[in-house]
Image: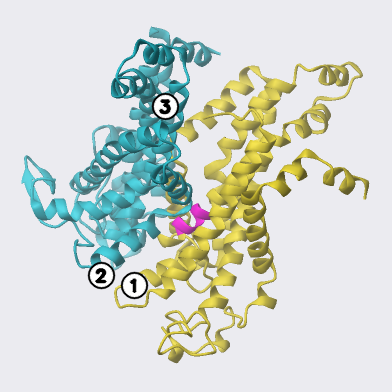
Chain colours: A cyan, B yellow
Amino acid sequence: MFAFIVRRIIQAIFVMVIIAGIGFTVQNKLGDPVRDMVGERVSVAEREALRDKLGLNDPFLTQFGRFVRNAVHGDLGISYFHNKPTVDVILSKAPATLELVFGSTVMILVLCFPIGIYTAIKPKTWFSRFVMGSSTIGVAVPVFLTAITLIYIFGVELKWLPSYGRGETVDIWGWDTGLLTADGLLHLILPSISLSSIMLPLYIRLIRSEMMEVLETEYIKFAWAKGLRRYRVWLVHAFKNTLLPVVTVFGVEIGILFAFTLLTETVFQWQGMGFMFLEAVERSDTALLVAYLVVVGVMFVVINTLVDIAYGFINPMVRITGAK
Amino acid sequence: MRSWQRFRQSYFFYSFKRDPVALGSFSIFFFLFMVSIFAPLVAPYNTYDTSTYDIMDAELPPSWMDDGEERFLLGTDIQGRDLYSTMIYGLRTSVFIGVGAVLFQAILGIIVGLTAGYLGGRVDSTLMRIADIQFSIPYLIVAIIASAIFQLAFGVGRFEELALPLLIVIIGLSEWPKYARTVRASVLGEKNKEYVEAARVIGLNRRLIMFRHILPNTMTPVLVISTIQVAQAIMSEAALSFLGLGMPVTKPSLGSLIKAGFEYVFSGSWWITFFPGILLVTFTLVIILFGDWLRDVLNPKLYKG
């Protein structure tokens, strides 16, 4: 087990170096820190002097070493547009994205279990057929179309729900939250529904098929034979054993949910990390783009490493195949 | 002719004829595919030619509505282009990128998977580690960051000129691990079979065994995931274009049409978003339905990952 953890951590470090390498190359080749600092009006000689002073004429490896050292210390340069350290900009936008992911995760968890179980128990009813049909279509509908449709129906035609921005937010220990005000929660509804629409069909199908499989097993037949009440068999005996696959998939899917926040945030002008990233691309804010790349990279590497190590504890097979 | 005869008597064709979903989805797919290929013949206007449209015609509603004009069946977009023609050309761009990206990722993934699976050992573990690592990061994030970097590197103007080949490369690069894993899994199943051993005994070289003997036998799972991958690639392209990192509005794909129309939904011009959206959903849906049917019929042992 120890060897497995060490190997996973070495791999994580290796990946981080590659991501840092990509980030550094982008910054080095595409960005110009001197322009970011002084603008276009300074003479060539002065710029050269500044380049020397900043160490931009040093050998590649020296510069890369400096980049990594600064990154480890949490310094990823200054955003050209915001005129603030990039890490601060990203951290100030992170709560919005995390709350969006949180909101749609809650929505998925609240909806997928009852619907999944119902469609497994009563596969022939019109509601089950409707759910299965719409989940097939749901997979083919891009998240931005769902979002636009929701805005058009609930925001423009019915005027029930606000369709852009985060609404009123409260600052709690530096965390800018919209979860504690009624206005903030109202603003969260449409974006969360749109974001959950990509994962919900998959989860309902997963739970349904797992549940149907479990209902065929011997121990469930035995439970019926014992004369247990229906709800006890369904919700206690059968449901418990559908949970494991759902939990294993969940770790991976959270990452995909995060990826789709970029689209949701664009449609709803949700001031999160994805929205910030696309603005940075539009403004050619290289430092911010590189910082985003590194932060997202670290996030995925850390999550994946932790998930893998956790699997290693649960399932020894992973350790063995990893060794080969 | 013989092979056509064989195909007609096969179980594959038999079950295809009997399944309304397969038949329906394939006919719609085939129809839309043909329309997109013969776009210049089908579309009433050539939307790439700026002399054919006039900004004065902008935002006209579909012809059956009050302000609609007979000339523009589904109305016009914000630049005064006939929406119907623009959609056909947009579908063509989407199909082109979808198929191109899948070909690109399939070639890359097959080479990697075949090499890793057949050679084994250190080559295998290195290549599959790379695939695993990329697989653990969602393809959409990879594609979005890659196109952002490309856009910075080339500048917006140059990126728009090169958008089509660049998108094929970007989407291809972001999804190749799926092929690599699938192919490797079936190569591992094939490589110890007798026909491979026989080929080895008569002294054929490794490359010949890999590409002429093993590869054809791994094609079933490749075919099955390819249909789904085309749908996936088209949706990725639409997402990228919607974010402004894909096809420009001058050479629109379905995604960039939706993006252009989105800003006008609030002012009531719903058709610029609605019709391209419906077309996109229909097209991906029929591909997915057909892919599902294909998977059930051919029933390969797919790598579940």
Q: Amino acid at mark 2?
A: Val
Q: Residue at x 64, y 25 (%)?
A: B185
* 1 and 2 marks in contact (CB < 8 Å): yes
Q: Examine the residues drawn in magenta and state their main secondary structure.
A: helix
Q: Amino acid at mark 1?
A: Val
Q: Which quadrant would residue B9 be assigned to in this image?
A: top right
Is A292 magenta? The answer is: no
Task: Specify the segment rendered in magenta.
Answer: B234-240
Nearer the observer: mark 1 or 2; the answer is 2
Q: Amino acid at mark 3?
A: Met
Disc 3 secondary structure class: helix
Left or right, A208 with reference to A39: right
Measure the C-alpha gap from mark 3 to mark 2.
40 Å
Spot occupied by residue A93 in the image (x, y as percentages of width and height): 21, 48
Residue B265, label in figure: 1
Left or right, A68 with reference to B277: left
